[in-house]
Amino acid sequence: MKITASAISLNVKDVRASADWAATHLGFSEEMAAEGFCSLSHPKAGFNLIYLATGLPTFKPASAAGHADGLLVVFTVDEIDAEYARLEGEGVTIVTPIETEPWGERYFQMTDPNGVVYQLVEWVGPTDAEYATQQ
């Protein structure tokens, strides 16, 4: 198989709200849009973010046509503390404040206007000495 591009498609109630949020706060750019559809790209993301309006009659399979739920859209970043401060200052809804796991994952989670959860991560190395010695 030769994969030529990648995308993640998220079903949301308000396509424009999520697309504008991703452009404003995450630096994505709109590539194409139509009624109930928007595709955005970012030079470093590795995939396009696609938003589809819930309830589109053309969506297949129909069993998966509900709201995007139970998933995280995750991006690894540099300088996570600066990103946290910037996004908090921009009024982004933070649902999990910044924290560091013992294995070195420093992260926080936020939501867009449709409730899609985005997680930013920076790998900082193990913080728990016992965990680090077990590796």
Image (cartoon, rainbow, N blue to C red):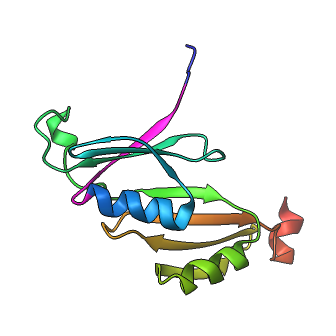
Q: Where is 42 relative to 94, above or below? A: above
- In the image, is 32 to the left or to the right of 123? left
Q: Where is 45 relative to 26, above or below? A: above
Nearer to the camera, 69 or 87 = 87
Q: Where is 3 relative to 7, above or below? A: above
* Residue beneath the point at 39% across and 68% down: 112
Q: Residue 69 lies in what quarter of the image?
A: bottom left
* Residue beneath the point at 40% across and 62% down: 20
* Residue beneath the point at 61% across and 40% down: 46
Q: Where is 112 relative to 15, above or below? A: below
Nearer to the camera, 35 or 96 = 35
Residue furthest to the top in view is 1
- In the image, is 70 to the left or to the right of 109? left
Q: Position of residue 63 (x, y in %)?
A: 16, 40
Count of picture labels:
0
Magenta span covers which residues?
5-14
Q: Position of residue 80 (x, y in %)?
A: 70, 72
Q: Position of residue 17 (x, y in %)?
A: 32, 64
Nearer to the camera, 122 or 83 = 83
State which quarter of the image contains the N terminus: top right
Q: What main secondary structure does the magenta stretch of the protein show?
A: strand
* Residue beneath the point at 20% across and 32% down: 60
- In the image, is 134 to the left or to the right of 92? right
